[in-house]
Amino acid sequence: MPVSIADVARHAGVSPSTVSYVLSGKRSISEDTRRRVLESVRVLGYRPHAGARALASSRSNVIALVVPLRSDVHVPVAMRFAVSVVTRARAHDHDVLLLTQAEGADGLRRVAGSSMVDAIVVMDVEIDDARIPVLRELGLPAVLIGVPADTAGLACVDLDFQEAGRLCARHLADLGHRRLAFVGEPPAVYERRTGFAERTLAGFREAARERGAEVPAVLPCEPTRTAAEQAARRLLRDHPGVTGLVVQNESAAEPLVAALTAAGRTVPGDLSVVAIGADDVAEGTAPPLSSVGLPAEELAERAVELAVRGLGGDAPAGVTLLPPTLVDRSSTAPAPRRASA
Amino acid sequence: MPVSIADVARHAGVSPSTVSYVLSGKRSISEDTRRRVLESVRVLGYRPHAGARALASSRSNVIALVVPLRSDVHVPVAMRFAVSVVTRARAHDHDVLLLTQAEGADGLRRVAGSSMVDAIVVMDVEIDDARIPVLRELGLPAVLIGVPADTAGLACVDLDFQEAGRLCARHLADLGHRRLAFVGEPPAVYERRTGFAERTLAGFREAARERGAEVPAVLPCEPTRTAAEQAARRLLRDHPGVTGLVVQNESAAEPLVAALTAAGRTVPGDLSVVAIGADDVAEGTAPPLSSVGLPAEELAERAVELAVRGLGGDAPAGVTLLPPTLVDRSSTAPAPRRASA
DNA sequence: CGGCGTCATCGAAGCGATTCGACTCCCTGG
DNA sequence: CCAGGGAGTCGAATCGCTTCGATGACGCCG
């Protein structure tokens, strides 16, 4: 049942090495031989044995992907990302071995040490991630989604969240909003220092300051409906002067807007709202929210690209930040005219 | 850098085969030798080369997992499932190769043919799934999540959705509800014949009939907020007599209940609602919904168990249906007393 | 016409494990 | 005292592929 390269060789009347060269293209082969061999491959249904290939070539053509367990990124985004990694990897003739966060540094050592994979992509890295020194000494191309504190020797890909924060602040400020609020991720995310959250906030604050807008309220928010509603109430009660709002929390966006509406505020009439995160969330609210999308597919593509290129010898260590773009839907408008300052 | 079994053998003063036997436990080894070898393994940091092992033993210790692309199952459930499969596989000393639906039957042939994996788990199978004949002829243990029409020679695991439907109908009927409605998955799911949806409905109808309850309304529902709200309105308008409602649609559950409440109906005062699906969805509504949960972790565990056992020689083909349980939260109550029939 | 570079192919040596005899002790029973 | 047997170990074959060096044929140039 299992047909080997020797079978193909026999069938085509050539030597095994010739078959190998036909398949890999690493040496020139006459057109005639090539055709005969490929025909034999087809007829016999030959598939190279992955293990043997890995053994002989010290390349497994497999990329490890480490996915978060309980993620700071909202689950559908993580899933989109994972699926895209598989798709992109396939386009480069690689497969994907799935690991969970729970495997930790040992898991990385294991799959790398046993030559199961020849590159590693890690999602959801924290600023001070225990796996980073390990990745560095593994000697495989490693690509991180997210940007840790020390990126030396590692390739990182991420959305430029700082710029995303700036974009949001500027967008609102340029519409005349002078008091802005930010509803963010749960406190745990900030405590764990997952990077993207604080970088967004930093960019947001920076651009607000630049434009002379105040930021009287920054509210972390658990990813539940009631937490979002509570945040909305608190916002309206404690900061009635706020007219521009940024939400970076996929689970909170819709309920937050709903709560504001229910409280008699119109969006964008009374309050302009910008979201940061998965596009489908922003599109699914009423009204749809202007937002800075999270390009999961593109991140995955870059990550795989870097990983594969890393195999090619050149190790493109360094940080790749994708430029964010703000899609204007109908949730932002010029600030309402009121007693001006 | 790469330390091989020969290095370990030399270091421990034994032959390579002895090292192998120590590690695999397939022959008796003196306690003394065992200790020396293990110590050498530790000191040298030896990791068996996965490819070499696979080549020699014709076992890769890898399980393929095929995940849906755009899934009928809601994404967080799929993710939980995938993560659990990895976890359980690790517990059996296996790794997981991630494939997407997009790879189709050819992808299965590829990974099986090249001996990359030695078992396959497929999520989200349809009743008449093109991959099924392929799985059957592959000669590897295959486990399906979901139950196709022809299960001959295959192992299938699923929640007993028919029984879940029955449970819901009985629960409501036993509380005195005589008119029941069912809000289900999007029409596409039924058209694609994904099995679980229609089986649930069948069980629901069957038990309702048994208990003498009517089912005047069955509404498929897109997974959007507005679709759910629309379903709620239609229900109240066209079927005012309905007092018991079953929702099998994770995305619709919360907005549906919210819409009912907004329309002045109380849950469970006016309307009792039971959900089928992920527990966290049911817990996250106001009020929390009584529900039949989808035991993703347990399904994954069974699936991996079956796959691994399949490797052991015995092929436990057959259908394993997990018994559903209805968790009573606070969304169901005795039917309101009205003009009785 | 001899030497040389190319092209196409082959043979054989690994790659790093597993596994199947075979061999050596040593113990036990007859 | 010797045959028999189990425990412990080794050597060598094997798995299926890649890749390096060698070889033969051919055409070209001086």
Image (cartoon, coloured by chain):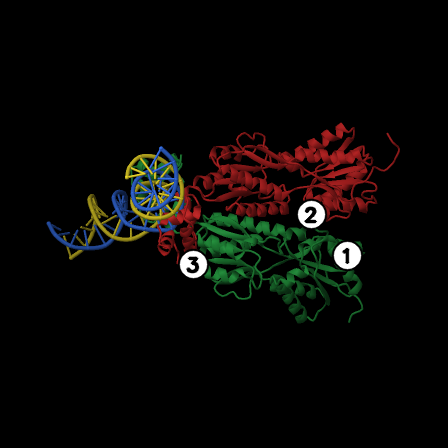
Chain colours: A green, B red, C blue, D yellow
Left or right: residue A5 versus residue A258 is left
Residue under label 1: A260
Q: Which residue is mark 3?
A: B43
The quadrant of the rendering that contains the C terminus of chain B is top right
Q: Is residue B295 visible?
A: yes
- Residue located beneath label 2 in the image: B280
From the top left corner, tell me how far across and down residue B90 is, in percent.
Answer: 53, 47
Looking at the picture, tell me which residue is in the foreground, A232 or B321. Answer: B321
2 or 3: mark nearer the eye: 3
- The percent position of residue B136, horizontal first and vertical second, equals 50, 33
Amino acid type, mark 3: Val
Near mark 2 (Cα within 10 A), the count class, few <14, some 14-19 or many ≥20, is some
Residue at disc 3, secondary structure: helix
When asked about the image quadrant of residue B295, the answer is top right
- Measured as percent of width and height from the top left, residue D10 is found at 32, 48
Picture quadrant of residue B226: top right
- In the figure, residue A228 lies in which quadrant? bottom right
Q: Chain of mark 3?
A: B
Instruction: Locate residue B194 relative to residue B311 in the image: left or right.
Output: right
Helix, strand, or loop for circle 2? helix
Tags 2 and 1 both on a single chain: no
State the separation of the CA atoms marked 1 and 3: 63 Å
Say whether residue A244 is left or right of residue D8. Answer: right
The label number, if any, that marks residue A199 in the structure image: none
Neighbours of disc 3 within 10 Å: few (<14), some (14-19), many (20+): few
